[in-house]
Image (cartoon, grey):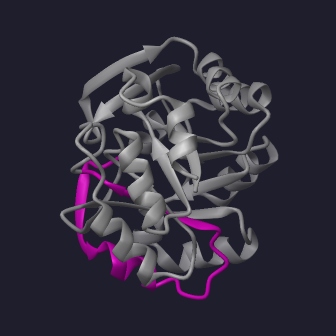
């Protein structure tokens, strides 16, 4: 199972939110690129980036930080937040981002998302953020009436490279992941599923690996030291 250290960017800084709440922000570094270099030096083979400002505004905002992370890290980076136009997809892929996470438009404009998946096969990730099993959108500010698994199944057969499935209730809370929900999603779809939200200890990582997850995103737990990247990589097998 791959371990994806998370670097969430807001105002050009490396931050973490609790349950996606922009009013519950902790700044963990003034230089996201330096943070990326730090995780790579500790063994990270890939990085999960989120443009939090972009998620709110519907367009990429922290492009300078993203480009610098890609330049200095030397590992595959995936990016989510504000990716809602084809020209944005092309620009970010040309900038060296390995894969892009799209969530809001997959829900609101599924035909557009299918079209983009076919234009960029194997480069787009279906990002599903769920609250109580229902898809949350617009930087987690809105909750839809669409069940998360139902959304994923709409795209069966499309050349999606992965699903990043985030349980908002556990995200940033350091209380453990929703393994049952993650397992249900992995069983429901044909693509690799990357679990996100609540991963706190090496036992959490081991449980997700045993459940068959393809990857695991870890954020606050790494920054607050409840788990080290070395421990996480070892627990992932």
- Residue 130 in view in this figure: yes
- Vertical placement of residue 48 versus 229, above or below: below
Q: Residue at x 59, y 78 (%)?
A: 114
Give the left or right position of residue 62, taking residue 140 as reference: right
Q: Residue at x 42, y 31 (%)?
A: 227
Quarter of the image holding residue 77? top right
Range covered by the magenta-colored residues: 139-168
Q: What is the quadrant of the N terminus in the image?
A: bottom right
For this orientation, the residue located farthest to the top is 30
- Provide residue 163's location: percent of width, then percent of height: 51, 66
Quarter of the image holding residue 61? top right
- Provide residue 223's location: percent of width, then percent of height: 43, 23
Q: Nearer the viewer, residue 179 or 10?
A: 179
Q: Nearer the viewer, residue 142 or 229?
A: 229
Q: Nearer the viewer, residue 27 or 42?
A: 42
- Residue 165 in view in this figure: no
- Provide residue 40's location: percent of width, then percent of height: 68, 29
- Provide residue 108's location: percent of width, then percent of height: 40, 70
Quarter of the image holding residue 143? bottom left
For this orientation, the residue located farthest to the left is 132
């Amino acid at each position: 199972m791959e371990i994806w250290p998370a670097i969430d960017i807001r105002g050009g800084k490396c931050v973490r939110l609790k349950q996606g709440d922009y009013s519950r922000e902790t700044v963990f570094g003034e230089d996201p690129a330096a943070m990326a270099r730090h995780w790579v030096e500790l063994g990270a083979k890939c990085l999960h980036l989120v443009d939090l400002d972009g998620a709110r505004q519907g367009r990429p905002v922290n492009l300078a930080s993203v480009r610098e992370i890609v330049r200095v890290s030397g590992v595959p980076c995936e990016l989510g937040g504000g990716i809602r136009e084809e020209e944005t997809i092309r620009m970010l892929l040309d900038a060296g981002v390995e894969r892009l996470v799209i969530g809001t438009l997959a829900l609101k404009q599924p035909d557009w998302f299918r079209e983009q998946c076919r234009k960029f096969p194997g480069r787009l990730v279906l990002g599903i953020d769920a609250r109580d099993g229902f898809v949350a959108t617009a930087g987690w500010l809105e909750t839809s009436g669409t069940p998360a698994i139902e959304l994923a199944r709409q795209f069966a057969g499309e050349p999606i490279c992965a699903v990043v499935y985030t349980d908002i209730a556990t995200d940033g809370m350091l209380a453990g992941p929703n393994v049952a929900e993650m397992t249900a999603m992995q069983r429901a779809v044909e693509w690799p599923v990357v679990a996100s939200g609540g991963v706190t200890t090496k036992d959490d990582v081991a449980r997700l690996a045993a459940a068959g997850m393809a990857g695991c995103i870890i954020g606050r737990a790494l920054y607050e030291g409840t788990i080290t990247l070395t421990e996480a990589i070892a627990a992932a097998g």
